[in-house]
Amino acid sequence: MPKPPNILLITSDQQHWNTLGTTNPRIRTPALDRLAGEGTTFTRAYCPNPTCSPTRASLITGQYPSRHGCWAIGVGLPENIPTVGDALTRAGYRTGLIGKAHFQPLASTPDSPSIECQPLLRDLDYWRRFKGDWYGFQHVETARMHGFESHAGQHYAIWMEENGLANWQDYFQQWPPDPSDKYARGRYLRGGMTWDLPERFHHSHWVGERTCAYIEDAVATDRPFFLWSSFFDPHPPYVIPEPWSSMYDPADMEIGHFVEGEMASMPRHHQLTREPSPDFSDWNEPGGQGVHGFHSHLHSEADMHRSMAIYYGMIGLMDANIGRILDTLDAQGVADNTLVIFTSDHGHFLGQHGLIAKGPFHYEDVVRVPMIVRHPGKVPAGARSAALQSLVDFPQTFLSAAGCEIPGVMQGVDQLDAWHGSAHAVRDWAMVENRHNPTTVHLRTLITDRYKITLYRGTAEGELFDLEADPDETRNLFHARDHAEVRANLMHRFLQAEMERESSPMARVAGA
């Protein structure tokens, strides 16, 4: 009986779909280019939610955010929810998570306890004891920050101390916050900076090094492994040490642009992003929190050029460590029996439609993600596929690859035939949810081969784009009379998709 394949999921955080060297000559990603050359690049992959926690929860549960419960960032994923790691553990796999988790919020309450919050993040004695089991991962090494955020700590801080950086806190924003902090200006939306952290202590090196160590340990046990190697970049703030911060000339960057008039037919919250001091108070409600993207998106071209140059440098350092991981698979002799998947939790705006970072604006830039799959002898090498993919499908497909039964509670589809190239596509739609506030910021998007339609709760506003005729999404056809029939057909398909994605936690075993 053949040995079950190892499964290695590698993710970035908030990476635009068009930041691979195989598709964009302005960026250099030799490791990911190698992975693409040895596997298949999927050009139509979508996240189930364009923010971190909901999609990350979908990646381990196979459920949409509206089902698994982590419906927005700042909402915790219940720790007792069944995960793909649980199922693979029962099948004899070693399971591990190295890097970013973000399953729980930055606050803890009796009704919603969280270990991913201050001051616990910097209680290193706690994290020296904490190794898992957590959300189906038997082994866990995690951290919570992006860039130089004050949330740094956990296993990453332990690693820095063990490797000689006893004063690691000097290189991160202070906790509690200090107005005189040298990193007080965050660089989350505009500009960028060279981080004075010694490059060898960057968290991309930590994720790469610890991933390699985990693979080596797992191979020594002669058991198959499921490992999530979860990088933090290129999520802002836009900061990276040298030589990566000067690797790209800002003048060479091809930034996105606003097209005059494109917001005229868009929902009002899109239009407000063009104002210098927009008022988004109409979307406030009890139980709500700050909404990512509800601010002015006006920016100078110089700032955006600088942001993109740093963003590309952040991807470059991550790519170098992905190369280390691929080399370790080769050195350990397990590359041929390891299913490797690379993707990102959601996308990012770099000036497209005049927008920056992320928000409830479901353009391709933020809902579409890069995706590469490699499994020598099974996944076609050097291929490109336009088969629709959703990250919610990953758990089902991992279980299928491992020869395991797929639980009825999962809502995605088994993509293994599409990954192996034996089927052109196994789904004809993808769904993106976004419920950033309980009722006022609540939208869903249905994507088909040609069209994309977005509906908003409690309003007649909406979006409809013909991705074939208008790939840049500058002409909203939602209220266009000549597309009324297209809209009606898509609304019907939307309802069908909602029914198709219902799960079946329990089998029907009798007539009554």
Image (cartoon, rainbow, N blue to C red):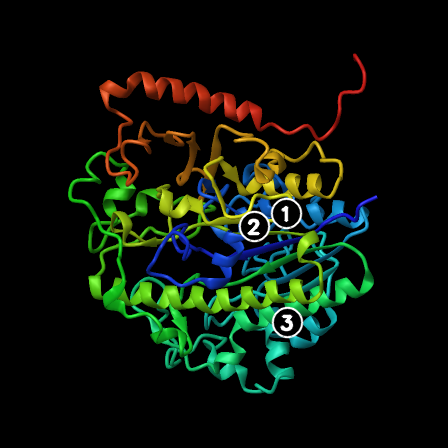
| Residue depicted at 32% across the width and 67% down the height | 309
Q: Is residue 123 left or right of residue 496?
A: right
Q: CA distance from mark 1 to mark 2?
A: 7 Å
Taking the image as shown, residue 85 lies to the left or right of residue 365, namely right
Crowding around mark 3 (Cα neighbors within 10 Å: few <14, some 14 to 19, many 20+) is many
Q: Secondary structure at mark 2?
A: helix
Q: Position of residue 506 (x, y in %)?
A: 74, 28
Quadrant assignment for the C terminus? top right
Q: Earlier in the sequence, mark 2 or mark 3?
A: 2
Residue 314 image-quadrant placement? bottom left
Residue name at image x 19 percent, y 45 percent: 259
Report the quarter where the N terminus lies: top right
Question: Disc 3 designates what residue?
Answer: 155
Vertical placement of 254 versus 463: above or below?
below
Give the residue at x 50% y 52%.
Answer: 36
The image shows residue 398 at horizontal and vertical percentages of 67, 44
Residue named by callout 2: 56
Instruction: Write down the residue under mark 1.
Output: 60
**Does residue 5 sit above or below 147 in this rendering?**
above
Q: Position of residue 129 (x, y in %)?
A: 74, 71
Name the foreground residue: 354 vs 336.
Answer: 336
Q: Amino acid at mark 1?
A: Ile
Asked if the residues shown at circle 1 and circle 2 are in contact, with their CB atoms under 8 angstroms apart, the answer is yes
